[in-house]
Structure formats: structure tokens, C-alpha cells
């Protein structure tokens, strides 16, 4: 089997996973830097008035046409103290330009909020549009015996090249301050609760998207005024797809001159049977920049050459006035 043939097989496997496993869902290694994709309960959970997030991930460029994911979001609290979040996702995958465009609205509420703990619940709903460019694909019927001929009929039929459906998501977050500068953060979220039909072929019965369950357990230890360590375990369960992500980050806060927050961080994570990835970033007052790179360790290594995905996240926090979102003594660094 040649390397070229192996790449085609890998692309077929990746395409099937997109159609039947991931559904509407988007995948970021730096999940904490895309909070509205992680958990609707994170809507409005920051230390400012308006938060603006942007994310980009490029994956499998070494195999063939890269898979690109883009997100932009904003969340803020209204004059009635109701958090509102707006999230736009776009994913473009493979040679077929398999495209997913999604718009979500979210909100969250405090169930418990005191000086030691906080319990929040969030809700999210929206609309997803998916399309495929069949003209970018080739089929065996277009092989004329010696070469591929795009002018030949593919002898394939699709009922739709574009579909749309609604999506309903929800999540919980519990944060508690423990002894001696320890903070624990527990998150549970569910996506695709309505299990919308995602079939392009008009399948009977409909092909419903599997509900995706996310969980995250994070422990933060403030060593001193300059250093802190964050260790987390993150899981995804969606149908046959199971994922476990574990790792740690080291944060270093520089001298707080002129009332500006300046910090650096770096981290190392392992995604089971898939990849290691390294992450690093900087905080400068209202700006937060994060970078990560995946080192592929899965069965795709012969084609990927261990090159996985590059990711970048940029966050800006707009503060009109000084206020505290929560009386919890150790504040979130989601910005």
C-alpha cells in the first residue's frame, strides 16, 4: 500500500467520523479558551462587562486538505444582570468542503453564590447549517480505465447538499474555594439534547446526532503571589467516541505595574490514544493570547508524520466600570 493510498483511506475514516460521530460539535484543544463551546454555564462568568473570544484551529494539513475550525463569541451581562452569550462556529473539512455553520445564544444563572462557592446553570440554543460540495469529490465511476475523468457521470445521487437543524444544550458549573489557596472547578455539560436529524440522504429512520456529554474537573493551587498550578481532567462521551484529556498548566504573574495584569503560562496535556499537545500564552491587562500545537500519536502517524493541529485563541475583556462578578476569593482566569 502506497503512502498516497493510505492518505485516501485516512481521509475516508476522518470524513465518516465527521458525519456520524461529531455531528454539530467543534473540537478545541484549549477548550477553556472557547468557554461557550465548553459549557453554557460559563456565559457571563468573567471579570468585566463584555468578553470577546476568537478561536482558530487547523488540523491534518500534513495529510491532505486541512480541516479548519473558526469561532467567535461575545458574552455580557445586561442592565437586568442577565448574562447573554452569542456564539458563531464554522468548520470546513476536507476536499468536499464539508461545511458547518452554527449560531448559538446562551444564558446562565447562579443557583448558589457566596464567599466560598458558586453553582451556575446555563442554557444554549441555536441553529446549525451543514453543506457539502459534491463537485469536489471523485468516484469510481469517473475512472475511465487509465485516469480520472471529471466529465464522466459519478452515478451518485444525494437528496440534499445542504441541511439545517436546531440544537439545544445545557450545562452546570460548581466552583468552591478549599483550604490554603486551593480552588476546585467541576463542570458538566450536554450538547445535542434534541438529537436533530443530520442525514443528507433522507435516511429512514433519521440519523440523529448523538448527545455529547462533557465533564471537567480542575484543581487550582495558588503557590504564592506569582505562581499557580492548574491541573485538569476533561472527558468527552458521544456515542462510540470517547475522549480523555489530562494535563497541567503553570502560571506566572509578573509584577502588577500601573494596575495592569501581566502573566505568562505554559502547559502540557495528553489526549488518550491520540496526541500530546503543548500550550503557552500571555495575559496583558484586557488581552489574552493562547497558542497550542498537537503532536499526533495515533494510528494516523504514517500519514500525519506526528503533525496534528495548530490552534490560536485571542480574548479581549472590555471593562466600563469596576465590578465583581462573584464574591469568590479566587477569581476565574477565563477573563
Image: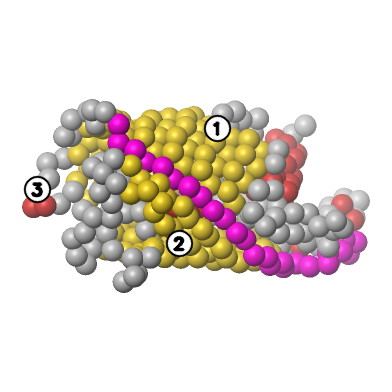
> Which quadrant would the N terminus be assigned to in this image?
top right
Residue carrying label 2: 107
Q: Position of 240 compared to 170: left or right?
A: right
Residue carrying label 1: 244
Secondary element at image label 1? strand
Residue 135 locus on image (x, y percent): 75, 64
Q: Of marks 3 and 2, which one's residue comes earlier in the chain? A: 2
Q: Which residue is more in the foreground, 266 or 61?
A: 266
Farthest residue to the left: give it. Answer: 258
Q: Of marks 1 and 3, which one's residue comes earlier in the chain? A: 1
Residue carrying label 3: 257
Residue 317 locus on image (x, y percent): 29, 59
How many other residues sit within 10 Å of disc 3, few (<14), some (14-19) or many (≥20)? few
Q: Nearer the viewer, mark 2 or mark 1?
A: 2
Q: Which residue is more in the foreground, 195 or 250?
A: 195
Residue at x-position 91% and y-position 51%: 145
Amino acid at each position: 500500500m502506497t503512502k498516497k493510498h493510505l492518505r485516501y483511506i485516512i481521509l475516508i475514516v476522518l470524513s465518516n467520523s465527521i458525519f456520524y460521530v461529531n455531528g454539530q460539535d467543534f473540537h478545541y484543544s484549549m477548550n477553556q479558551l472557547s468557554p461557550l463551546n465548553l459549557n453554557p454555564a460559563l456565559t457571563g462568568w468573567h471579570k468585566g462587562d463584555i468578553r470577546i473570544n476568537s478561536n482558530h484551529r487547523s488540523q491534518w494539513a500534513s495529510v491532505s486538505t486541512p480541516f479548519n475550525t473558526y469561532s467567535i463569541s461575545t458574552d455580557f451581562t445586561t442592565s437586568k444582570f442577565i448574562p447573554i452569550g452569542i456564539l458563531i462556529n464554522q468548520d470546513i473539512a476536507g476536499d468536499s468542503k464539508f461545511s458547518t455553520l452554527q449560531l448559538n445564544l446562551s444564558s446562565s444563572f447562579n443557583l448558589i453564590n457566596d464567599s466560598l462557592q458558586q453553582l451556575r446553570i446555563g442554557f444554549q440554543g441555536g441553529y446549525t447549517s451543514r453543506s457539502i460540495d459534491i463537485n469536489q469529490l471523485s468516484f469510481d465511476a469517473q475512472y475511465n480505465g487509465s485516469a480520472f475523468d471529471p466529465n464522466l457521470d459519478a452515478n451518485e445521487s444525494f437528496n440534499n447538499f445542504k441541511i439545517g437543524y436546531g440544537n439545544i444544550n445545557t450545562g452546570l458549573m460548581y466552583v468552591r474555594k478549599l483550604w490554603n489557596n486551593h480552588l476546585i472547578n467541576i463542570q458538566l455539560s450536554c450538547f445535542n439534547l434534541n438529537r436533530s436529524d443530520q442525514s443528507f440522504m433522507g435516511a429512514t429512520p433519521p440519523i440523529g446526532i448523538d448527545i455529547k456529554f462533557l465533564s471537567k474537573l480542575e484543581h487550582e493551587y495558588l503557590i504564592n503571589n506569582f505562581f499557580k498550578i492548574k491541573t485538569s481532567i476533561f472527558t468527552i462521551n458521544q456515542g462510540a467516541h470517547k475522549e480523555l484529556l489530562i494535563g497541567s498548566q503553570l502560571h506566572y504573574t509578573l509584577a502588577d505595574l500601573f494596575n495592569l495584569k501581566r502573566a505568562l503560562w505554559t502547559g502540557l496535556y495528553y489526549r488518550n490514544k491520540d496526541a500530546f499537545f503543548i500550550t503557552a500564552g500571555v495575559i496583558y491587562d484586557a488581552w489574552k493570547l493562547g497558542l497550542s500545537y498537537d503532536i499526533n500519536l495515533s494510528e494516523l502517524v504514517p500519514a500525519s508524520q506526528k503533525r496534528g493541529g495548530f490552534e490560536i485563541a485571542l480574548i479581549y475583556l472590555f471593562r466600563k466600570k469596576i465590578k465583581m462578578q462573584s464574591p469568590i476569593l479566587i477569581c476565574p482566569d477565563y477573563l
